[in-house]
Amino acid sequence: MLKPSPTGPASCAWAAKALTANVLLGIPGVIPVWLLWYFAANWPLAAIGWTEPEPTENDGPLPWLLLGGPVVLLFALAWWLLNRPPRDGSTPRPRLYWPLSALATLAPTLGLVVAL
């Protein structure tokens, strides 16, 4: 049976550490997000007419998959390992924790999108 989520200062401290770690991981995480957008904008989204492909991009998607795929996979692995909650029941509920972790990781990318 699942333990109820704890409340109080210990839970808030754990959440603050997790959000800080995810924001810090999101700073280098800008690169995999950009790689995913570049790939999507130049091939699948351009094929259905939602975006215009880069005119000088004539190598096809294979180099992007070979170079960008491992970068995205390594980042996803690092993110998952960072966010694996300890098994002592001191973490918040998964329904709240995982979306907040994803949003905290995307915060630097969203900040760049707004600023630029």
Image (cartoon, rainbow, N blue to C red):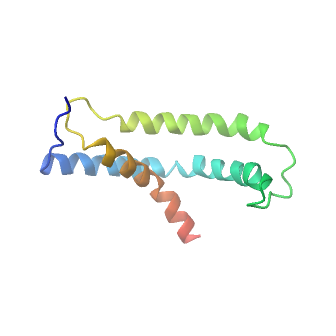
Q: Position of residue 27 (x, y in %)?
A: 49, 52
Q: Residue furthest left?
A: 8
Position of 15 compared to 50: left or right? Answer: left
Where the N terminus falls, by quadrant? top left
Is 90 situated above or below 57? Answer: above
Q: Position of residue 112 (x, y in %)?
A: 54, 64
Is 61 situated above or below 16? Answer: above
Position of 8 compared to 110: left or right? Answer: left
Position of 55 compared to 34: left or right? Answer: right
Is 98 situated above or below 55? Answer: above
Q: Position of residue 9 (x, y in %)?
A: 13, 51
Q: Position of residue 28 (x, y in %)?
A: 52, 48
Residue beneath the point at 49% across and 33% down = 77
Is 71 situated above or below 30? Answer: above
Residue beneath the point at 33% across and 45% down = 95
Position of 55 compared to 78: left or right? Answer: right
Picture mark count: 0
Foreground: 14 or 3?
A: 3
Residue beneath the point at 74% across and 49% down = 44
Residue beneath the point at 59% across and 70% down = 116
